[in-house]
Amino acid sequence: MSEVVRDAPTSTGTPRRFEDSSMSLVIGARTYNQDHVARGYQKGHRRVSVYVAWSYPGEANRDITELDNRFSTMTEVRRVLWPSYEAPEWSDPMRFQQGISGSLELFFWAWVRFQRVVTEATGYVVPVFQRIDQAGFRLPLDERVLADTDTLFVFGLDHNVTEQDAAPEEIEAVRQFLTREGTCLVIGPHHDVGAAEDMKTRVMEYAHHGDALVPRQQRFGRYTRSLMKGLGIPVENRWGLRPAVTKGTDRIAPLSIARDLDRRGWLAGVSTFNFHMHLPHYAVTTDDTKSVQVLARQPIDLSRPHPFTEAGNREFNTLLWLPPSGNRAGDVLVVDSTVFSTLFGVDQSLEQFWRNIATAM
Protein backbone atom coordinates (compact mmCIF):
# COMPACT_ATOMS: atom_id res chain seq x y z
CA MET A 1 0.00 0.00 0.00
CA SER A 2 1.14 3.53 -0.62
CA GLU A 3 2.06 5.63 2.37
CA VAL A 4 -0.81 7.47 4.00
CA VAL A 5 -0.73 11.15 4.80
CA ARG A 6 -0.22 11.52 8.55
CA ASP A 7 -3.26 13.43 9.63
CA ALA A 8 -6.19 12.59 11.87
CA PRO A 9 -7.94 9.45 10.57
CA THR A 10 -11.38 8.10 11.27
CA SER A 11 -12.64 5.21 13.32
CA THR A 12 -13.52 3.06 10.35
CA GLY A 13 -9.93 2.74 9.23
CA THR A 14 -10.16 5.66 6.85
CA PRO A 15 -7.26 8.03 6.11
CA ARG A 16 -7.96 11.50 4.81
CA ARG A 17 -6.43 10.46 1.52
CA PHE A 18 -3.91 8.09 -0.01
CA GLU A 19 -0.84 9.68 -1.56
CA ASP A 20 -1.20 7.26 -4.46
CA SER A 21 -4.78 6.10 -4.70
CA SER A 22 -4.54 4.34 -8.06
CA MET A 23 -5.75 0.85 -7.16
CA SER A 24 -4.21 -0.72 -10.27
CA LEU A 25 -0.73 0.55 -9.48
CA VAL A 26 -0.40 0.16 -5.71
CA ILE A 27 -0.48 -3.63 -5.47
CA GLY A 28 0.33 -6.61 -7.65
CA ALA A 29 -1.84 -9.56 -8.63
CA ARG A 30 -4.23 -10.67 -5.88
CA THR A 31 -5.60 -14.11 -5.04
CA TYR A 32 -8.68 -15.01 -3.06
CA ASN A 33 -10.73 -18.06 -2.09
CA GLN A 34 -7.77 -20.44 -1.96
CA ASP A 35 -6.62 -22.85 0.73
CA HIS A 36 -3.61 -21.75 2.77
CA VAL A 37 -0.33 -23.40 1.78
CA ALA A 38 1.64 -24.21 4.94
CA ARG A 39 5.07 -22.65 5.35
CA GLY A 40 7.95 -24.95 6.26
CA TYR A 41 10.11 -24.30 9.31
CA GLN A 42 13.46 -22.60 8.78
CA LYS A 43 15.71 -21.86 11.73
CA GLY A 44 16.08 -18.12 12.26
CA HIS A 45 13.03 -17.22 10.15
CA ARG A 46 9.75 -16.56 11.92
CA ARG A 47 6.41 -17.38 10.36
CA VAL A 48 3.94 -14.58 11.10
CA SER A 49 0.16 -14.89 10.70
CA VAL A 50 -2.75 -12.50 11.23
CA TYR A 51 -6.14 -13.69 12.48
CA VAL A 52 -8.98 -11.15 12.21
CA ALA A 53 -11.51 -12.24 14.81
CA TRP A 54 -14.60 -10.90 13.10
CA SER A 55 -17.45 -12.22 11.05
CA TYR A 56 -17.10 -10.24 7.85
CA PRO A 57 -20.76 -10.85 6.92
CA GLY A 58 -21.81 -10.10 10.50
CA GLU A 59 -20.16 -6.68 10.26
CA ALA A 60 -21.08 -5.92 6.63
CA ASN A 61 -24.74 -6.87 7.12
CA ARG A 62 -25.36 -4.70 10.17
CA ASP A 63 -28.52 -2.60 9.87
CA ILE A 64 -27.37 0.87 8.82
CA THR A 65 -30.43 2.39 10.47
CA GLU A 66 -28.90 1.32 13.79
CA LEU A 67 -26.79 4.17 15.11
CA ASP A 68 -24.51 2.21 17.44
CA ASN A 69 -22.08 -0.70 17.30
CA ARG A 70 -21.34 -0.84 13.60
CA PHE A 71 -18.76 0.37 11.14
CA SER A 72 -19.58 3.30 8.89
CA THR A 73 -20.63 2.74 5.32
CA MET A 74 -18.26 3.96 2.63
CA THR A 75 -20.92 6.51 1.67
CA GLU A 76 -20.84 7.90 5.22
CA VAL A 77 -17.04 8.04 5.09
CA ARG A 78 -17.20 9.99 1.84
CA ARG A 79 -19.75 12.41 3.25
CA VAL A 80 -17.85 13.14 6.46
CA LEU A 81 -14.45 13.38 4.76
CA TRP A 82 -15.61 15.11 1.59
CA PRO A 83 -13.94 15.64 -0.88
CA SER A 84 -11.09 13.26 -0.03
CA TYR A 85 -12.88 10.18 -1.32
CA GLU A 86 -14.52 11.56 -4.44
CA ALA A 87 -11.97 10.04 -6.79
CA PRO A 88 -13.51 7.31 -9.00
CA GLU A 89 -11.55 4.50 -7.36
CA TRP A 90 -13.43 5.18 -4.11
CA SER A 91 -16.74 6.76 -5.16
CA ASP A 92 -17.67 4.71 -8.24
CA PRO A 93 -19.95 1.84 -7.12
CA MET A 94 -18.68 -0.20 -10.08
CA ARG A 95 -15.14 -0.03 -8.66
CA PHE A 96 -15.50 0.10 -4.88
CA GLN A 97 -18.17 -1.09 -2.47
CA GLN A 98 -20.20 1.76 -0.96
CA GLY A 99 -21.77 -0.02 2.02
CA ILE A 100 -20.15 -1.15 5.27
CA SER A 101 -18.18 -3.70 3.26
CA GLY A 102 -16.31 -0.83 1.58
CA SER A 103 -15.05 0.39 4.93
CA LEU A 104 -14.03 -3.16 5.88
CA GLU A 105 -12.01 -3.51 2.70
CA LEU A 106 -10.01 -0.42 3.63
CA PHE A 107 -8.54 -2.42 6.51
CA PHE A 108 -7.13 -4.96 4.06
CA TRP A 109 -5.61 -2.17 2.00
CA ALA A 110 -3.98 -0.78 5.12
CA TRP A 111 -2.40 -4.07 6.23
CA VAL A 112 -0.52 -4.55 2.97
CA ARG A 113 2.50 -2.50 4.02
CA PHE A 114 2.76 -4.33 7.35
CA GLN A 115 2.62 -7.64 5.48
CA ARG A 116 5.34 -6.51 3.09
CA VAL A 117 7.66 -5.22 5.83
CA VAL A 118 7.33 -8.49 7.74
CA THR A 119 7.80 -10.56 4.58
CA GLU A 120 11.02 -8.69 3.84
CA ALA A 121 12.22 -9.23 7.42
CA THR A 122 11.37 -12.94 7.64
CA GLY A 123 11.35 -14.29 4.11
CA TYR A 124 7.80 -15.61 4.56
CA VAL A 125 4.52 -14.25 3.26
CA VAL A 126 2.05 -13.13 5.95
CA PRO A 127 -1.38 -14.73 5.56
CA VAL A 128 -4.45 -12.88 6.85
CA PHE A 129 -7.13 -15.26 8.13
CA GLN A 130 -10.67 -14.29 9.05
CA ARG A 131 -12.91 -16.02 11.56
CA ILE A 132 -15.74 -15.84 9.01
CA ASP A 133 -14.72 -14.45 5.62
CA GLN A 134 -16.50 -12.68 2.76
CA ALA A 135 -17.64 -15.98 1.25
CA GLY A 136 -18.99 -17.28 4.55
CA PHE A 137 -16.19 -19.78 5.22
CA ARG A 138 -15.72 -20.18 8.98
CA LEU A 139 -12.22 -20.72 10.35
CA PRO A 140 -11.94 -21.19 14.10
CA LEU A 141 -8.54 -20.50 15.59
CA ASP A 142 -7.10 -24.01 15.38
CA GLU A 143 -4.18 -25.97 13.96
CA ARG A 144 -5.03 -24.88 10.42
CA VAL A 145 -3.83 -21.43 11.50
CA LEU A 146 -1.38 -22.34 14.25
CA ALA A 147 0.62 -25.26 12.86
CA ASP A 148 2.88 -23.15 10.63
CA THR A 149 2.88 -20.00 12.78
CA ASP A 150 5.53 -18.71 15.18
CA THR A 151 4.09 -15.22 15.80
CA LEU A 152 0.31 -14.89 15.78
CA PHE A 153 -1.51 -11.55 15.61
CA VAL A 154 -5.15 -11.64 16.73
CA PHE A 155 -6.96 -8.43 15.78
CA GLY A 156 -10.04 -7.79 17.91
CA LEU A 157 -12.06 -5.71 15.46
CA ASP A 158 -15.30 -7.59 16.05
CA HIS A 159 -18.21 -5.59 17.44
CA ASN A 160 -19.47 -7.25 20.60
CA VAL A 161 -23.00 -7.48 19.19
CA THR A 162 -21.84 -9.97 16.54
CA GLU A 163 -21.26 -12.45 19.39
CA GLN A 164 -17.85 -13.80 18.45
CA ASP A 165 -16.58 -15.87 21.39
CA ALA A 166 -13.51 -18.07 21.62
CA ALA A 167 -14.65 -21.66 22.01
CA PRO A 168 -12.95 -23.87 24.63
CA GLU A 169 -11.24 -25.78 21.81
CA GLU A 170 -9.78 -22.55 20.41
CA ILE A 171 -8.51 -21.44 23.81
CA GLU A 172 -6.86 -24.81 24.31
CA ALA A 173 -5.31 -24.69 20.83
CA VAL A 174 -3.73 -21.30 21.56
CA ARG A 175 -2.61 -22.50 24.99
CA GLN A 176 -0.84 -25.43 23.32
CA PHE A 177 0.61 -23.09 20.70
CA LEU A 178 2.19 -21.04 23.49
CA THR A 179 3.86 -24.11 25.00
CA ARG A 180 6.14 -24.14 21.95
CA GLU A 181 9.47 -22.47 22.65
CA GLY A 182 9.87 -19.14 20.84
CA THR A 183 6.23 -18.51 20.02
CA CYS A 184 4.57 -15.13 20.44
CA LEU A 185 0.92 -14.07 20.65
CA VAL A 186 0.14 -10.43 19.80
CA ILE A 187 -3.45 -9.71 20.81
CA GLY A 188 -5.29 -6.43 20.29
CA PRO A 189 -8.91 -5.83 21.28
CA HIS A 190 -9.97 -2.45 19.91
CA HIS A 191 -11.62 0.39 21.83
CA ASP A 192 -14.68 0.22 24.09
CA VAL A 193 -16.60 3.46 23.58
CA GLY A 194 -19.91 4.09 25.33
CA ALA A 195 -19.84 1.24 27.84
CA ALA A 196 -21.46 3.45 30.49
CA GLU A 197 -25.25 3.54 30.71
CA ASP A 198 -25.15 7.23 31.61
CA MET A 199 -25.78 9.29 28.48
CA LYS A 200 -23.85 12.30 29.78
CA THR A 201 -20.77 10.11 30.06
CA ARG A 202 -21.23 8.97 26.46
CA VAL A 203 -21.54 12.58 25.33
CA MET A 204 -18.26 13.40 27.09
CA GLU A 205 -16.53 10.43 25.45
CA TYR A 206 -17.78 11.45 22.01
CA ALA A 207 -16.60 15.04 22.45
CA HIS A 208 -13.25 13.81 23.73
CA HIS A 209 -12.26 11.68 20.73
CA GLY A 210 -13.89 14.05 18.21
CA ASP A 211 -14.52 11.52 15.44
CA ALA A 212 -17.86 12.19 13.71
CA LEU A 213 -17.91 8.65 12.32
CA VAL A 214 -17.80 6.87 15.67
CA PRO A 215 -21.19 6.02 17.18
CA ARG A 216 -21.95 7.05 20.74
CA GLN A 217 -21.55 3.40 21.60
CA GLN A 218 -19.01 1.24 19.78
CA ARG A 219 -17.87 -1.76 21.78
CA PHE A 220 -15.21 -4.03 20.29
CA GLY A 221 -13.25 -7.15 21.11
CA ARG A 222 -15.62 -9.76 22.51
CA TYR A 223 -13.60 -12.54 20.89
CA THR A 224 -10.23 -11.33 22.10
CA ARG A 225 -11.63 -10.64 25.56
CA SER A 226 -12.91 -14.20 25.81
CA LEU A 227 -9.60 -15.57 24.53
CA MET A 228 -7.61 -13.56 27.06
CA LYS A 229 -9.92 -14.64 29.86
CA GLY A 230 -9.54 -18.29 28.86
CA LEU A 231 -5.75 -17.98 28.73
CA GLY A 232 -5.60 -16.19 32.09
CA ILE A 233 -4.34 -12.91 30.63
CA PRO A 234 -5.47 -10.30 33.20
CA VAL A 235 -6.11 -7.42 30.80
CA GLU A 236 -9.24 -5.56 29.65
CA ASN A 237 -9.70 -3.02 26.86
CA ARG A 238 -11.41 0.09 28.20
CA TRP A 239 -12.48 3.46 26.79
CA GLY A 240 -11.47 5.11 23.53
CA LEU A 241 -8.91 7.81 24.31
CA ARG A 242 -7.55 10.53 22.06
CA PRO A 243 -3.75 10.68 22.23
CA ALA A 244 -1.87 13.92 22.74
CA VAL A 245 0.16 15.36 19.87
CA THR A 246 3.51 17.10 19.94
CA LYS A 247 2.89 20.80 20.44
CA GLY A 248 2.72 22.74 17.18
CA THR A 249 2.37 19.58 15.05
CA ASP A 250 -0.22 16.95 14.17
CA ARG A 251 2.16 14.12 15.14
CA ILE A 252 1.33 11.84 18.02
CA ALA A 253 3.23 12.55 21.24
CA PRO A 254 6.13 10.17 22.04
CA LEU A 255 5.46 7.10 24.12
CA SER A 256 6.42 6.94 27.78
CA ILE A 257 8.56 3.78 27.60
CA ALA A 258 9.78 1.65 30.51
CA ARG A 259 13.11 0.80 28.90
CA ASP A 260 14.33 -1.00 32.02
CA LEU A 261 11.46 -3.51 31.72
CA ASP A 262 11.89 -4.12 27.99
CA ARG A 263 14.37 -6.98 28.31
CA ARG A 264 13.48 -8.41 24.92
CA GLY A 265 13.93 -5.16 23.04
CA TRP A 266 10.40 -4.98 21.67
CA LEU A 267 10.71 -1.19 21.61
CA ALA A 268 14.36 -0.90 20.59
CA GLY A 269 14.63 2.04 18.18
CA VAL A 270 10.96 2.91 18.72
CA SER A 271 9.71 6.26 20.06
CA THR A 272 6.13 6.55 18.72
CA PHE A 273 3.32 4.48 17.29
CA ASN A 274 0.69 6.17 15.09
CA PHE A 275 -2.15 8.58 15.70
CA HIS A 276 -5.67 7.26 16.10
CA MET A 277 -8.49 9.29 17.60
CA HIS A 278 -9.76 6.64 20.02
CA LEU A 279 -7.32 4.11 21.40
CA PRO A 280 -8.05 1.59 24.14
CA HIS A 281 -6.55 1.71 27.60
CA TYR A 282 -5.34 -1.79 28.45
CA ALA A 283 -6.25 -2.07 32.10
CA VAL A 284 -4.29 -4.61 34.12
CA THR A 285 -6.71 -6.49 36.36
CA THR A 286 -4.18 -8.15 38.68
CA ASP A 287 -1.87 -6.87 41.40
CA ASP A 288 0.89 -9.20 40.21
CA THR A 289 3.18 -6.66 38.57
CA LYS A 290 5.67 -9.34 37.51
CA SER A 291 3.23 -11.27 35.34
CA VAL A 292 2.26 -8.23 33.24
CA GLN A 293 4.81 -5.57 32.31
CA VAL A 294 3.50 -2.20 31.11
CA LEU A 295 6.17 -1.32 28.55
CA ALA A 296 4.60 1.80 27.05
CA ARG A 297 2.03 4.41 27.96
CA GLN A 298 0.56 7.04 25.65
CA PRO A 299 -0.04 10.65 26.80
CA ILE A 300 -3.70 11.72 26.48
CA ASP A 301 -5.07 14.88 24.89
CA LEU A 302 -6.01 16.81 28.04
CA SER A 303 -7.74 19.64 26.18
CA ARG A 304 -10.81 17.42 25.86
CA PRO A 305 -12.39 16.17 29.13
CA HIS A 306 -12.93 12.45 29.63
CA PRO A 307 -13.97 10.36 32.67
CA PHE A 308 -10.58 8.63 32.61
CA THR A 309 -8.65 11.90 32.84
CA GLU A 310 -11.09 13.37 35.32
CA ALA A 311 -10.13 10.47 37.58
CA GLY A 312 -6.56 11.79 37.49
CA ASN A 313 -5.04 9.78 34.65
CA ARG A 314 -2.73 11.50 32.16
CA GLU A 315 -1.58 8.47 30.14
CA PHE A 316 -3.08 5.13 29.11
CA ASN A 317 -1.47 1.71 28.76
CA THR A 318 -0.74 1.01 25.12
CA LEU A 319 1.77 -1.90 25.12
CA LEU A 320 1.82 -4.73 27.64
CA TRP A 321 4.17 -7.73 27.77
CA LEU A 322 3.60 -11.03 29.51
CA PRO A 323 6.95 -12.87 29.60
CA PRO A 324 6.97 -16.68 29.53
CA SER A 325 5.67 -18.16 32.75
CA GLY A 326 4.90 -21.67 33.98
CA ASN A 327 3.81 -23.91 31.10
CA ARG A 328 3.66 -20.92 28.75
CA ALA A 329 6.97 -20.83 26.88
CA GLY A 330 5.84 -18.09 24.48
CA ASP A 331 5.56 -14.34 24.90
CA VAL A 332 2.30 -12.41 24.88
CA LEU A 333 2.02 -8.78 23.76
CA VAL A 334 -1.15 -6.71 24.11
CA VAL A 335 -1.31 -3.77 21.68
CA ASP A 336 -4.05 -2.30 19.50
CA SER A 337 -4.47 -3.57 15.95
CA THR A 338 -4.38 0.00 14.61
CA VAL A 339 -0.64 0.03 15.31
CA PHE A 340 -0.21 -2.34 12.36
CA SER A 341 -2.28 -0.32 9.91
CA THR A 342 -1.09 2.43 7.59
CA LEU A 343 -4.53 4.01 7.77
CA PHE A 344 -3.32 5.84 10.84
CA GLY A 345 0.07 6.92 9.51
CA VAL A 346 3.39 5.11 9.30
CA ASP A 347 6.98 6.15 9.82
CA GLN A 348 10.38 4.63 10.54
CA SER A 349 9.67 4.23 14.25
CA LEU A 350 6.52 2.24 13.62
CA GLU A 351 8.09 0.02 10.99
CA GLN A 352 10.94 -0.67 13.41
CA PHE A 353 8.38 -1.93 15.94
CA TRP A 354 6.97 -4.26 13.31
CA ARG A 355 10.44 -5.61 12.55
CA ASN A 356 11.27 -6.05 16.22
CA ILE A 357 8.26 -8.33 16.67
CA ALA A 358 8.82 -10.15 13.39
CA THR A 359 12.46 -10.97 14.12
CA ALA A 360 12.36 -11.57 17.90
CA MET A 361 14.05 -14.90 18.67
Image (cartoon, rainbow, N blue to C red):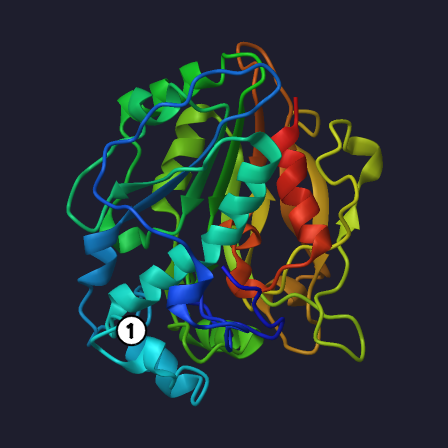
Against 63, is 143 above or below? above
The residue tagged 1 is: 73
**Residue at the far right in the pictured view:** 260
Give how far across and how far down residue 150 sits, in percent: 50, 23
- Local packing at callout 1 (Cα closer than 10 Å; few below 14, some 14-19, many 20+) is many
Against 252, is 186 above or below? above
**Residue at the far top in the pictured view:** 327
> What is the three-letter code of the residue carrying label 1?
Thr
Pick the residue in front: 252 or 161: 252
Q: Residue at x 34, y 41 (%)?
A: 223
Q: Quadrant of the C terminus?
A: top right
Give how far across and how far down residue 25 sits, in percent: 43, 65
The image quarter containing residue 34 is top left
Pick the residue in front: 129 or 179: 129
Give how far across and how far down residue 303 sits, in percent: 70, 78
Give how far across and how far down residue 31 sits, in percent: 28, 46
Q: Is residue 21 left or right of residue 169?
A: right
Q: Residue at x 37, y 72 (%)?
A: 215
Q: Please say whether residue 286 is visible from this viewpoint.
A: no
Q: Residue at x 64, y 33 (%)?
A: 321
Q: Residue at x 34, y 43 (%)?
A: 53
Against 80, is 98 above or below? above
